[in-house]
Amino acid sequence: MLKRDEWDAIVVGSGMGGLVCAAYLAVSGRRVLVLEQHDVAGGNSHVFRRRRAYEFDVGVHYLGDCGPDGVLPAIFSGLGLGDRVTYREMDRGGFDRIVLPGLTVDVPVGWEAYTRRLTEALPGEAEGLTRFTAVCEAVAQETRGLLLSDGELSVADLMARTPVSAEWGRRTLADLFDHCGLGPRARTVLAAQSPNYGIGPREAAVSTHAAVTDHYLRGAYYPEGGGQVLAAALVEALEAHGGELRTRSRVARILVKDGRATGVGMTDGEVLRAPLVVSNADYSRTVFDLVGEEHFGRRVVNRTRQARMALPLATLYIALDTELPARPNANLWWYRDDDIEGYYDRVARESITPVPFLFASFASLKDPGTAAVCPPGHSNFQVMTLCPPSYEYWGVGAGPAAGERYRRNTVYQRRKAELTEAMLGAAEEALGPFRDHVVHLETATPITHERYILATGGTPYGLAQWGGVGNRPDTRTTVEGLHMVGTNTRYGTGITGSAVGGMACAAQILGRGLLAEVHRGALLGDPDLLPARGADWDPLAVSRGAGRRSARGLARIG
């Protein structure tokens, strides 16, 4: 029997990629330890509670492709969790509402309906819009086909199966706009949802935009019970199959000897051994802080040092003591003007007042049956905008990941207050007046995000540039026994992208095509091992891990 400080695999960080990878290793017979520095597992999928009445999602605002053929449901079903994670579908006729001055476009399910809606809204651009969506749909279908294929393809087979991706996948969205002869208004409508990946048209790869757009055009959903149910279900599968989650356990160093990973050293001095380490920590922090650049090749180090991160978000978490006026179950993408490229330029220049863009997500519309969201007759929603990432803009020095205490910093407080007021003003422009009904208002900045997630640049989206358009690192590294997962890898951002990356990492380790298997219906986990859920089942408590499940300090509703 293995000692408590020896494991088959150690996963550093418990975001969606780390938890999915850990769970699949566990159901495949590996003894797995997950270490999380925060109080609960889940990364960007976690929630927080306020006033014993409201629960706010940090990063799960909607999920795509959760129908019968969906990728994310297949990943959970393969672990035996198919009945434990369910989804509420948003309006099929318009799950995203894009609003520009004088123009509103409701984005429906399906490429054909989407193209028709676009050409009806902008008839003078019909030819270019049709050409644009045809390219994106083809790239998305080719990418999905590869994702769900068995085994590795030869270069010749790869090129034969992805001709449109070969031509357009690594070119920028702006290149495709130019090719299609599209004007500023059409470009803004098409890229309106680009804050879903935090990169503007001059930097974003067509493959990225196509994959994210296709993801939602397959149907937009919200997990019943909120984002924390995703992490909690994965923790249940991990623990049921012999794995362990330890929260409030920060790793100081990933140990490497003679070119291979041997375990981790904790901040309290404890050493835990394993021949396999999977880092779900921030990519650059993994390379430079946890492992050390001396263990990587010059190319990886240079790319990582020169990399640029996707833009971060500022978020207002808002609760009202009244219901919002009737509106569709759709997100709102509101723009002050129709110059999407100018918008990204202004953010880069740290000029975001007045606020040029807002994304609004209405949790109390998406999940009305969950009592934790808000009391009856109240509203719970979030308002977000992309914002400058630099420490200088926020008046911060070394940053919270380095231990800096910033919340009483007067420059930071002023910036935060200014942005809060500007976002509230823009939100009332977009939604109508609501300030008189606010009963809870809380602002999270990129510095807040770094504090909890330790993400470089405070972004939930990972790398924008890593050696070229569309380039991102794989989950396998040149250090034997060391793998990486998360939003920085080539499998993409968001909950599903991170989950797919976790699957890909587990597949590389186990030497089998896991995603294709589970998408065809394979069941690797044993549902009979999963714990019963009582009436008081709390996903936030489950996500603390068995060792801290009943510890004091857990926020509750009611």
Image (tube, rainbow, N blue to C red):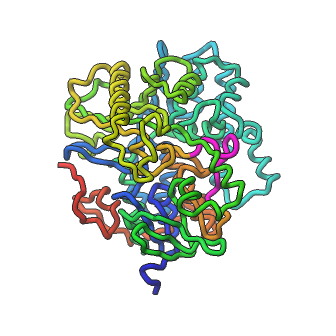
**On the rendered structure, is 210 left or right of 424?**
right
Q: Nearer the viewer, residue 439 or 272?
A: 272
Q: Nearer the viewer, residue 260 or 204?
A: 260
**Residue 73 in view:** yes
Q: Position of residue 373 (x, y in %)?
A: 27, 43
Q: Position of residue 77 (x, y in %)?
A: 47, 59
Q: What stretch of residues is rendered in magenta?
A: 463-475
Quadrant of the image occupied by residue 59: top left
Q: Is residue 141 above or below residue 175?
A: below
**Residue 365 in view:** no
Q: Position of residue 26 (x, y in %)?
A: 48, 71
Q: Residue furthest bottom?
A: 1
Q: Residue at x 31, y 48 (%)?
A: 48
Quadrant of the image occupied by residue 208: top right
Q: Residue furthest left?
A: 558
Q: Is residue 325 above or below residue 158?
A: above
Residue 472 part of the magenta-drawn span: yes
Quadrant of the image occupied by residue 37: bottom left
**On the rendered structure, is 152 left or right of 45?**
right
**On the rendered structure, is 295 left or right of 350?**
right
Q: Is residue 137 above or below residue 185?
A: below
Q: Residue at x 24, y 40 (%)?
A: 374
Q: Residue at x 61, y 58 (%)?
A: 475
Q: Nearer the viewer, residue 95 or 311?
A: 311
**On the rendered structure, is 235 left or right of 158?**
left
So how many labels did they put on this image? 0
Q: Position of residue 151 (x, y in %)?
A: 70, 61
Residue 425 part of the magenta-drawn span: no
Magenta region, main secondary structure: loop
